Image: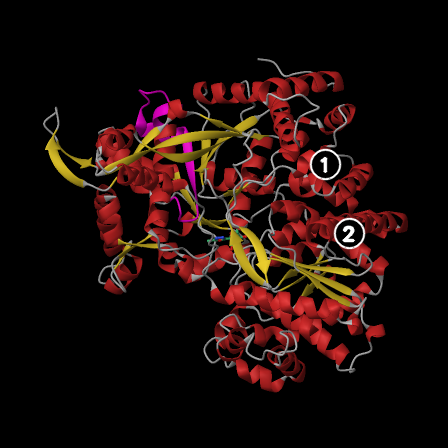
């Protein structure tokens, strides 16, 4: 198979053929959706030959691959990415115009696959992009959720969730392979038997099973001809279910059984950072890792492969604890199915896994009840118990008499109920354990898993997160991209450190003027979008102050809201002359987990404040608050390039890394931030003069936590008191004094994430922001330096670090 020619004529011909033959419509009668599907199919032809080549090579070549195991991939739209990778943008635009069609309209018809919640899923998408661009063989394994992250709407300012029906209009980017389906067992019991060699062995007699059908997605490298694979699994009922339906007197019941099986991949759990203790979630986790391991070990590798050498061919990266059940599953496959000895199997398993932890919040470390695992995966529980017994024996040998330590480290906890601590299991099984930013890795080592790091210091490492410069600079910000390329060439697209070449231009007045013009035009583009999409009027002359991320108390959207209310209160009370205020537009973008009450209260409060502020002539032209609904990757791509100020205000020690912080800085926003997550590294790199630091440091947080009384902050700070009083007064809720009661009481009497303690420092830092923004040229200089110094945050660099510190894999150009 060959790649079609890169010409407008060839494109038009292929596109019309796809429309006629693929969609079965003429151009004249085609809908936008027909056109978008035909376009996607035409573009994917350009990747197909290389993809097939990469898949064939993978099976032939002895090069070690990465198996990225992630329950989430927040991919974003596929068309733009494919156009970028194939360099087809101009050809396609021209070809469509020749057919009387507009590329942007077709682009907007694509519903992004939102198969992730936030940072963790988007990180996985950036990583697979980088590995393809770096020619590293990788298969991304995950779940093809029928419904991705919910679509957020607002009704009376409150979040209402709608199902994300991303598959209904057709999904031209996926390739189902039912012939490669895998069977996945659940429940039942285990028994011992004597095998042909007279050996006593164990087997699992399952209670029910489903099949996993793989859907392949292309992961194109940037103009390097490589296309890796993302393999997402979808659950189907087995034939037996059909038979049951056929034989059953109770048809409805039998159909219900079928639905039950297919429910496994029905919906993404809309949680971020905290696990949902749901049986279905454990089923999802086991389902996708069982499919993935069997796929790689028995389909990709030759059938007779010597499994004691498995680690020479694959390393599975565990993206947080969600896929950790893969550890006992590999042991089961090696011991029960491939008949390796326990010790041989454990030796190879330990070399095949590495574990990334993405959190510090204790409640986010998954613990599955022993009863549940025993019921759903009885053989796995036995395997986990044996791994634990051998591990604890090792602990006792190393630290004799220290039974408290043994209890702390045990994979199986006793209290509050018997549970399997998945982070412990992962740490025991992995070659390496990494955190996702320097500070996070340090805290992970010293505070979350201190006993483990004492026992195995060499096992712990850091890899700071990164973001793909293809999607988040080249594609999302074409104007800045062009300006950068004109200045330093286009090598930065695959070697982001080259942005350093911009550094001297920060002192070039003409370059600064052009940089400012780019920002302004990005704001205009955003203003157009928000006008059409949400009916907002975005004042393009004001400072665009952006806080986009999942809604979580530790991220402290409420602190940002207090700042907004303070500014508003000072103006309407007459204490501050509006003419002296630097005009700002505050943009929020955030989804709350549907069951997370305080997060939803915060959304409601932001929307209520927004409605009043935007309508009040007293602050017109000075302060506005916009909160477009349904923040997702597509919206991020318009918002981030327009931002002036990036809000990264989590309580120190709580945000593992953050990646929005990197995207915003890379697009020339200055950060106002705490000393948390990757903010620490951003500040180190861009310099204190180009970053607005505020708030307690992590050790201060730890100390204050022992005696924190939030209401004291309220009593002692007049501005804070006025802001909270105004919030409680009903002024933002049509006179209803109870509207924000849960939020306000939470802040005053609990404030687990110490928003009130950091308020003064935060508003003072915001005054420094205002002062700096008054000099637009100096601001532009600082913004350019942010761009120039953020090359480190490329996910290509993250991948290099994983390769050097963890995987020890090599690039393998496709076709070799
Ligand atoms: C997120 C973390 O909260 C965020 O700090 C980090 O940047 C991102 O993962 C990627 O590493 N669920 N989501 C996260 O952690 C968990 C658990």
Q: Residue at x 83, y 59 (%)?
A: 541
Name the residue carrying label 1.
104
184 lies left or right of 87 = left
The picture quadrant where one finds residue 239 is top left
- Is the Cβ of the residue at disc 2 closer than 8 Å to that at disc 1? no
Q: Quadrant of residue 314?
A: top left
Look at the image and tell me whether residue 314 can be seen: yes
The residue most toward the top is: 1
**As drawn, 551 above or below 568:** above
620 left or right, relative to 50: right
- Magenta segment includes 304: yes
Q: Nearer the viewer, residue 720 or 473?
A: 720
> Viewed as shown, does residue 71 lie left or right of 282?
right
Residue denoted by label 2: 523
Extent of the magenta region: 297-323
Residue 681 in the figure: left or right of residue 249: right
Q: CA distance from mark 2 to mark 1?
A: 18 Å
State the SS at label 2: helix
When the figure is inspected, residue 500 is found, relative to residue 217, above or below; the finding is below
The one of 109 and 30 positioned closer to us in this rendering: 30
Q: Residue furthest right?
A: 510
């Amino acid at each position: 198979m060959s790649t079609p020619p890169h010409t407008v004529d060839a494109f038009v011909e292929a596109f019309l053929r796809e429309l006629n033959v693929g969609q079965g419509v003429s151009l004249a009668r085609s809908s936008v959706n027909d056109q978008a599907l035909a376009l996607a199919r035409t573009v994917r032809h350009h990747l197909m030959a290389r993809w097939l080549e990469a898949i064939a090579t993978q099976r032939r070549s002895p090069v070690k691959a990465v198996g990225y195991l992630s329950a989430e991939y927040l991919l974003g739209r596929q068309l733009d990415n494919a156009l970028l990778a194939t360099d087809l943008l101009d050809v396609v635009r021209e070809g469509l115009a020749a057919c009387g069609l507009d590329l942007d309209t077709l682009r907007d018809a694509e519903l992004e696959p939102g198969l992730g919640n936030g940072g963790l899923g988007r990180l996985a998408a950036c990583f697979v992009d980088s590995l393809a661009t770096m020619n590293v063989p990788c298969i991304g394994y995950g779940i093809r959720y029928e419904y991705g992250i919910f679509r957020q709407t607002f009704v009376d300012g409150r979040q209402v969730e709608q199902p994300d029906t991303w598959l209904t209009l057709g999904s031209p980017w996926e390739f189902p392979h039912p012939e490669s389906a895998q069977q996945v067992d659940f429940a039942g019991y285990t028994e011992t038997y004597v095998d042909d060699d007279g050996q006593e062995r164990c087997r699992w007699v399952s209670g029910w099973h489903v099949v996993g059908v793989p859907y392949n997605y292309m992961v194109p490298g940037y103009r390097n001809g490589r296309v890796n694979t993302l393999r997402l699994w979808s659950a189907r009922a087995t034939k037996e279910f059909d038979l049951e339906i056929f034989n059953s007197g109770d048809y409805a019941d039998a159909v219900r059984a079928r639905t039950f099986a297919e429910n496994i991949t029905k919906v993404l759990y809309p949680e971020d950072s905290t696990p949902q203790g749901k049986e279905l979630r454990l089923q999802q986790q086991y389902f996708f890792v069982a499919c993935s391991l069997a796929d790689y070990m028995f389909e990709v590798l030759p059938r007779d492969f010597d499994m004691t050498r498995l680690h020479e061919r694959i390393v599975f990266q565990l993206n947080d604890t969600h896929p950790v059940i893969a550890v006992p599953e590999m042991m089961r496959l090696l011991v029960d199915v491939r008949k390796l000895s326990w010790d041989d199997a454990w030796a190879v398993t330990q070399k095949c896994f590495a574990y990334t932890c993405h959190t510090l919040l204790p409640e986010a470390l998954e613990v599955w009840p022993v009863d549940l695992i025993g019921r759903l995966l009885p053989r796995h529980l036995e395997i986990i118990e044996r791994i634990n017994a051998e591990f604890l024996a090792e602990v006792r040998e190393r630290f004799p008499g220290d039974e408290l330590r043994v209890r702390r480290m045990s994979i199986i906890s006793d209290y509050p109920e018997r549970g399997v601590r998945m982070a412990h299991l992962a740490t025991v099984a992995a070659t390496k354990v990494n955190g996702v930013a320097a500070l996070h890795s340090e805290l992970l080592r010293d505070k979350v898993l201190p006993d483990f790091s004492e026992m195995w210091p060499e096992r712990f490492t850091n890899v700071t997160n990164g973001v793909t410069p293809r999607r988040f600079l080249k594609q999302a910000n074409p104007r800045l991209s062009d300006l950068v390329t004109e200045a330093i060439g286009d090598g930065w697209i695959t070697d982001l450190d080259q942005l350093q070449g911009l550094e001297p231009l920060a002192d070039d007045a003409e370059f600064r003027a052009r940089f400012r013009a780019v920002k302004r035009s990005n704001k205009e583009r955003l203003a157009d979008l928000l006008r059409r999409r949400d009916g907002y009027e975005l004042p393009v002359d004001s400072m665009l102050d952006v806080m986009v991320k999942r809604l979580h108390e530790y991220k402290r959207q409420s602190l940002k809201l207090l700042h907004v209310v303070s500014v508003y209160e000072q103006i309407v009370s007459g204490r501050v002359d509006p003419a002296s205020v630097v005009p700002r537009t505050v943009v929020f973008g955030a989804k709350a987990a549907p069951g997370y009450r305080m997060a939803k209260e915060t959304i409601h409060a932001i929307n209520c404040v927004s409605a009043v502020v935007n309508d009040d002539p007293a602050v017109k032209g000075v302060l506005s608050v916009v909160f477009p609904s349904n923040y997702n990757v597509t919206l991020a791509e318009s918002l981030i390039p327009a931002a002036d100020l990036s809000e990264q205000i989590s309580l120190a020690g709580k945000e593992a890394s953050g990646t929005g912080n990197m995207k915003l800085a890379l697009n020339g926003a200055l950060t106002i931030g705490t000393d948390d997550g990757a903010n620490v590294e951003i500040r180190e790199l861009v310099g204190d003069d180009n970053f607005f630091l505020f708030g307690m440091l992590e050790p201060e947080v730890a100390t204050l936590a022992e005696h924190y009384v939030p209401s004291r902050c309220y009593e002692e700070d007049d501005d804070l008191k006025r802001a909270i009083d105004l919030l409680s007064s009903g002024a933002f809720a049509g006179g209803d004094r109870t509207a924000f009661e849960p939020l306000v009481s939470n802040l005053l009497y609990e404030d687990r994430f110490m928003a009130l303690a950091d308020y003064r420092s935060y508003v003072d830092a915001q005054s420094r922001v205002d002062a700096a923004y008054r000099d637009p040229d100096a601001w532009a200089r600082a913004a350019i330096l942010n761009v120039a110094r953020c090359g480190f945050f490329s996910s290509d660099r993250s991948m290099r670090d994983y390769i050097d510190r963890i995987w020890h894999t090599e690039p393998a150009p496709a076709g070799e």
